[in-house]
Image (tube, coloured by chain):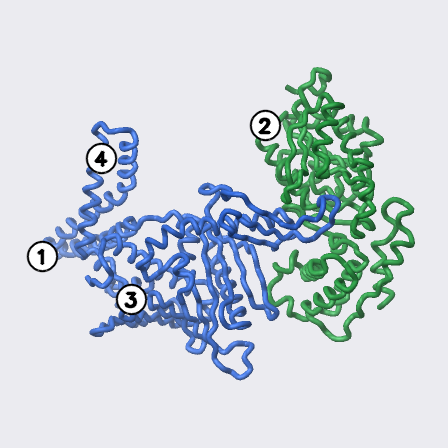
Amino acid sequence: MWRTSLRAGCRGCRGFGPKGIWGSHAVRRCSAPAPALPAGRITARQAVDVWKRHFEERGVTEPDNSSHYIIAHLLGAKTIESLEHGKLTEFLSREKTEQMWQLCTRRLSRMPVQYVIEEWDFRDLTLKMRPPVFIPRPETEELVELMLTDLEMEPGAKVGADGQRTCLEVGCGSGAISLSLLNSMPQLKSIAVDQSQDAVDLTRENALRLGLQDRLQVYCIDVLKDAETVVSLCSPVSALVSNPPYLFSEDMTSLEPEIFRFEDHAALDGGKDGLKVIKQILTVAPQILTNHGRVYLEVDPRHPPLIRQWVEANVEEMHYVETRHDINGRPRFCILQKKKSNKDHRLDQD
Amino acid sequence: MAYRRAVSLLLRRSECVSNPCTPRLLKSSNISSQTLRFHDHCIRTTRSVHTCTPLMVARLLSVDELFAKRSLQEYLKKMETEYDECLRETEEQSNEDELRARRIRASLLAPLIHSIRELNTKQKDFAETETLLKDEDPALRELAELERESCLQHIRDLSQKILDLLIPEEEADLSDLVLEVTAGIGGQEAMLFSAEMFDMYQGYAQHQGWSFDILEHTTSEIGGLRHASASISGPQSYKRMKFEAGVHRVQRVPKTEKQGRMHTSTMTVAVLPQPTEIFHDQPEGPEDRNEESKGAGGQHVNTTDSAVRIVHLPTGVVAECQQERSQLKNREKAMKALRAKLYSMKLEEETSKRYNQRKIQIGTKGRSEKIRTYNFAQDRVTDHRIGMTVHDVKNFLLGEDLLDEMNSSLQEFSNQETLIELLGENDQEGS
């Protein structure tokens, strides 16, 4: 019993992320023992209470939510509130009890709940989650929301022989943004790129599960190293969206273990000023976008004025339209637009 | 509905012949109680509907009785006059707004006036059949009989139609609703009862073809419900559900009771009209969303806490939701609940003034009224507002026909109260 829990706990600690940061540091933490499997039968509610207490004792963040989401998932619901009543007071089968213990032990190693249950919701979709692919944040739901409102209002440039609109996502991760857009706009086509093969695989998997694979192309490209491929493969598009790595390098060390140990650092670290990838995207954008095409970015709250200044000084073809705030009132989203250019006839769609 | 059906059963004599059990109408001197028992040969079980009317509640008047009232006749004449005036005025030169107002008024009255005139015609026809009945030719007499029957039917239908048209449609009647159930007095038993009631309404929504979307659901340790709310939408949903608002009482031996004693527990139902998107937009005034500030948020944080709590700052009204894993979805649900609360507050003033004198209260005045008792020992459900008792509690709690019938009776009673008010009488007056 002990060995199985140990193995289960360590599954998430296999060397992901940049080399050297893992290793012994992670393994040491994983050896925290789990509470023993109960000898007799217990109810779901009792299992939740045992593990909630244990999470609290071990300093695992959000002990309540963690045990609630895990038990709900095991019992076939998304949240504990939406469980059929009476389910919590029912006795768990032996199998379910073991599964509960297995999953909660993973959480004990600070593995994010989303990786423990291997799925999470984003807007209307349920997506598969797998370490180290970046887990979508609630703020990003708003990015999609504002993009949809924008796209629906503006007639926009029609690209492609069949008159369908195309959108490009840089750094797709699990595919949350692209798939959400495709799901809400049946006439949209999307291209998604990510420098991580794991992300590309997961996005493709999610697209297939949602039946959206016909309108989505996914490529493994690093926009920093290989901008030309992005331009040749992906242009022209009428919208570019990204939730790029935007953390400042110095902030990486203060991240919670959930993020630091399990999520791909390349999806988080934006360099000294957090703008490394953002700047590259904005530099390349004029070559990819149609005239009046827009860029939608999620950024760090400190970024918007910095981006505006930088764009005005360095990217003549892009015009900074506006900054939007997230649900917590922080400046979070930047919208930019490509000014009409006379340079490239290929992109001149007016 | 049951009362009216029973009364019309009496009048259709031809049908009564084939029915083995003839309904009997009993009338005693001071308490006007009518006991009707009938076997519906289509359904095996016997359902008894007692309408015992205590002295303070006026009984439900029949269509004929209402039409016999002079106040109604005068009112109808008044409507006809108003209609003619509206039409006449539009021919003359008046200012634009007045002209438009009169035209609108005329078009609103048109269906009513049309029905009134049709009714008058049918009544004339009916009078003519009287003379034909006395004719010597038996064939003609037979024809007259048939004609008479048909006229009577038309008259009845038109009368009902006119009554329906007289009752003004309330703005809220067109909306959807947010249902809130809260356990009241009685601890665990009250919470268990709340859970059963929530299920009943879910069943009712399904029975009526409405959607039932749970916004919030807080359970107790043994499977009871502390409080829950759901967004219900569909045709006539608010119009029907509004009669469910108030305190419901249960009398039974609780599951938790070890000594077999009877307990009385309560739960409260609140019904908030939910404006459809066309009527009302975002709530006015600043809102305070999630107060949690976890530093910079975004990529800095991994959280599974997607609960949303919205405070409408100008009024202090709060709505919460944590039903979903997606924060956006929780926000949408919380906004729905918030809008419903604000809208219902807005309507509150109007309705409380209008419903002030009535037996069937809508709005906050009605919220603390004990409206119904579910007695398991006697296997009955009694609605105290109209003094109606139905048997078979278990069946009632399915939220199907039995609840529907009671609801329809409440509707009829409420309509009648509206009518009486409209006619300017108080309800002590009989016909």
Dot label at residue B134: 1
Chain ID for label 2?
Answer: A
Residue, x 74% and y 57% (percent of image)?
A61
Chain ID for label 4?
Answer: B
Colour of the chain lettered A: green
Amino acid under label 3?
Answer: Val
3D distance between C-alphas at marks 4 and 3: 41 Å
Residue, x 29% and y 71% (percent of image)?
B54
3D distance between C-alphas at marks 2 and 3: 63 Å
Residue, x 60% and y 71% (percent of image)?
B222
Q: Nearer the viewer, mark 2 or mark 1?
A: 2
Residues at marks 2 and 3 on the same chain: no
Is disc 3 placed on a helix, strand or loop? loop
Residue B117 can be seen, yes or no: yes
Which residue in the structure is indicated by mark 3?
B57
Dot label at residue B76: none
3D distance between C-alphas at marks 4 and 1: 42 Å
Estimate how packed mark 2 is, as few (under 14), some (14 to 19) or many (20 or more) residues with alpha carbons within 10 Å.
few
Amino acid under label 2?
Answer: Pro
Which residue in the structure is indicated by mark 2?
A155
Estimate how packed mark 1 is, as few (under 14), some (14 to 19) or many (20 or more) residues with alpha carbons within 10 Å.
few
Residues at marks 1 and 3 on the same chain: yes
Which residue in the structure is indicated by mark 4?
B87
Estimate how packed mark 3 is, as few (under 14), some (14 to 19) or many (20 or more) residues with alpha carbons within 10 Å.
some
Colour of the chain lettered B: blue
Q: Is residue A242 above or below residue A160?
A: below
Amino acid under label 4?
Answer: Leu
Residues at marks 2 and 4 on the same chain: no
Hey, which quadrant is residue A219 in on the image?
top right
Image position, residue A349 (x, y; %): 66, 20
